[in-house]
Image (cartoon, helix red, strand yellow):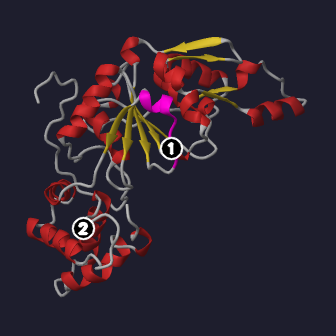
């Protein structure tokens, strides 16, 4: 398919994987054409990119990879069952307000003195978020965002960010619908101060939202998203991912690890028929750190590791 690509990732570089398994700076991500098309569609329409798929297929790390390719900061907020839509816009520092109200040596401020800017405020208008952050006494997180490894911090000025809202399906059912207006119009009202936060056109973020499908999302929210389901990659794609993340492991050993994973699948297995990237990378990580001694039987080691790493009894359920 030929089209004008707003997002056109180059060949990923090889990156030595670390012991921090879920820490990703976006380098080494292996894109396919479906993912590239989905990212381009989200950028062309200004809609959030809703990413679905099994745990471990690379949903969260996709945001870091996009940010690295676009030379943008990545901001991240993990959603929990207690997260409300307003928390992503602004919050009230109730503890500080209570302390000021009960401390005779302190003076109770105006309502705006206790407003803490949320991640979307920092994304839409960084200057006003910084001003409010200082007014609130430096309370709450200061969403500077991770600086891409291929760009100096001082060179990042007013460009838009890639924002990851991770695991939205864990949120209160009202959260997605309550975000429709802020995400659709790129503006919201800060009620305590009666001030509007409005994103400049050049600050419109690329929003990446992930879901593990633990809860059904509202139809109105889904209509406003570009949906991408990342399927477990093929064996060739897994080998490419392994090459990027563990370049120091010889190709023959990386392939042998994958072959042993596939051949060790239990006969009564009812789940997915191949590992997700995180499981394959964990197997390579285990081999890299546990099979350094030349006397180690790698095949025997992997056979013992498979029920711990990939073919777990808790995952033996029909998808």
Q: Nearer the viewer, residue 307 or 296?
A: 307
Residue 189 drawn at (x, y percent): 61, 16
Figure quadrant of the C terminus: bottom left
Residue 263's place in the image compared with 185, above or below, is below
Quadrant of the rendered image containing residue 134: top right
Query: Residue 226 falls in which quadrant of the image?
Result: top left
Q: Residue at x 59, y 32 (%)?
A: 85
Q: Is residue 273 above or below residue 87?
A: below
**Residue 103 is at least partly visible in this image:** no
Report the residue marked by disc 1: 216
Give the Cα separation between the discs numbered 2 and 1: 35 Å
Q: Residue at x 89, y 33 (%)?
A: 102
Residue at 23 percent across and 85 percent down: it is: 300
Label pair 2/1, CB-CB below 8 angstroms: no
Question: Which of the two labelled residues, at mark 2 and mark 1, occupies the earlier sequence position?
Answer: 1
Query: Which residue is nearer to you in this view: 236 or 123?
Result: 236
Residue on which disc 2 sits: 284
Per the image, label 1 sits on a secondary structure element best described as loop
How many other residues sit within 10 Å of disc 1, few (<14), some (14-19) or many (≥20)?
few
Does the image show residue 23? yes
Image coordinates of residue 43 in percent, x first then y, are 30, 24
Q: Position of residue 196 (x, y in %)?
A: 59, 12
Magenta residues, start to end:
215-223
């Amino acid at each position: 398919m030929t089209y004008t690509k707003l997002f056109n990732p180059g060949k990923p570089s090889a990156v030595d994987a670390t012991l921090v398994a879920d820490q990703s700076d976006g380098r080494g991500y292996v894109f396919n054409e479906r993912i590239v098309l989905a990212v381009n569609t989200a950028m062309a329409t200004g809609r959030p990119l809703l990413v679905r798929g099994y745990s471990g297929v690379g949903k969260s790390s996709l945001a870091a990879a996009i940010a690295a390719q676009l030379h943008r900061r990545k901001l991240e907020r993990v959603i929990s069952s207690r997260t409300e839509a307003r928390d992503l816009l602004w919050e009230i520092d109730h503890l500080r307000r209570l302390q000021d109200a009960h401390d005779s040596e302190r003076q109770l401020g105006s309502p705006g003195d206790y407003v803490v800017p949320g991640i979307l405020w920092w994304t839409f208008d960084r200057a006003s978020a910084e001003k409010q952050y200082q007014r609130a006494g430096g309370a709450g997180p200061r969403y500077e965002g991770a600086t891409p490894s291929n760009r100096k911090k001082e060179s990042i000025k007013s460009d838009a960010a890639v924002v990851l809202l991770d695991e939205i399906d864990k949120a209160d059912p009202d959260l997605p619908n309550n975000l429709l207006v802020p995400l659709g119009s790129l503006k919201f009202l800060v009620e305590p101060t009666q001030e509007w936060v409005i994103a400049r056109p050049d600050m419109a973020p690329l929003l990446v939202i992930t879901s593990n499908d633990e809860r059904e999302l509202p139809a109105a929210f889904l209509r406003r998203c570009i949906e991408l389901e990342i399927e477990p990659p093929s064996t060739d794609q897994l080998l490419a991912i392994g090459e990027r993340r563990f370049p120091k492991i010889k190709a023959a050993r990386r392939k042998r690890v994958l072959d042993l994973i596939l051949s060790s699948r239990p006969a009564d297995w009812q789940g997915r028929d191949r590992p997700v990237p995180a499981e394959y990378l964990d197997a390579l990580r285990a081999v890299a750190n546990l099979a350094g001694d030349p006397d180690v039987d790698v095949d025997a080691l992997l056979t013992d590791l498979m029920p711990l790493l990939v073919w777990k009894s808790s995952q033996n359920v029909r998808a």
